[in-house]
Image (cartoon, rainbow, N blue to C red):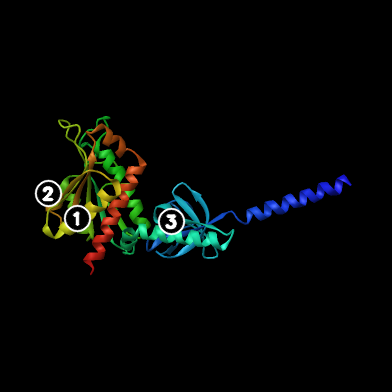
Amino acid sequence: MKQPIKWIWFLVFTIFIVSFSNIVYAANVNIKANDLRVRNGPGLDYEVIGEVNEGETYTYIDEKQEWIEIEYSNGTGWVAKEFIEIEKRNNQNSEQNEKNTSESEEIVLTDKAESEILTTNLKQKVIVIDAGHGGRDIGATGRSDLYEKDYTLETAHNIKNYLEQLGAIVHLTRSDDRFISLTPRSSYANFKEADVFLSIHYNSTPQYPSANGIGTYYYDDKDKLLATYVHEGLIESTGSDDRAAQFGDFQVLRTNHTPSLLLELGFISNASEEERIQTNTYQQKLSRGIIAGLQRYFFHSSN
């Protein structure tokens, strides 16, 4: 009699495990941006196989670093984690499902402002990003002895990657460590008929090592609205000290026929701020802030 009892207990245990597996959390992927590109692998080097839009929901499959795999078009695809929201679902009972729905609605209410601006379409917008300095022009030197020209190039590439995920057409005035004089930078934006030109810089005041924060500069009054929205986006996203959006007589702005800004994204002469600038988290926040500002600007300038 011992052998049948053993099998009965094994059967009960198996049923318990299967039942438990039916109440574990599954997940939905809620899309938070329009024209978000879907790729056939987790990275920008993979082929674009389609697009998804804000308000759409897909089933979560897997995750690799900053990419999420979803059920898509009779198969699967990958989207950038930055522009989605993962919503867990518990199928144990209806009461729990109602609770999850309530929590999801609460998240939507909390992010109402962000959701509003993410409805704006960046697809086909031409953005020229100018990584300040380069080559023999090293710019400022940080407290860690690293150069501004390297920080600006890294940031320019980061912003480009995020914008391209939303369908923007992005050009860099320089994609590597080379010297480019000021006139060709603005001329390039004029030639590309850019919708926006952004010149990326980092500040330095060695005589005031505690100076910190983000400042945004425009030259033409018609660009004041752009400056306001991008600056607000940066301050909201990074939590940095607000050094205001203000007039600045810079050549890359003065000779530019496209809406243009010069962004001072932090002080590398401040040891703690430079350390923060070096983190992926801060770089991501910079990109999110700039994108939020651009979306506000395009939304309001088109109405």
Foreground mark, 2 or 3, reads 3
Residue hosting label 3: 85
Q: Secondary structure at mark 1?
A: helix
Q: Secondary structure at mark 2?
A: loop
Q: Is residue 218 left or right of residue 11?
A: left
Q: Secondary structure at mark 3?
A: strand
Count residues near mark 3 (Cα–Cα under 10 Å), then give few for <14, some for 14-19, many for 20+.
Answer: some
Q: Is residue 177 left or right of residue 79?
A: left
Residue hosting label 2: 248
Q: Is residue 88 above or below residue 267?
A: below
Q: Can residue 257 be seen?
A: no
Q: Amino acid at mark 2?
A: Gly
Using the rendered view, name the quadrant where residue 163 is placed.
Answer: bottom left
Separation of marks 2 and 3 at Cα, in angstroms:
38 Å
Foreground mark, 1 or 2, reads 1
Residue hosting label 1: 228
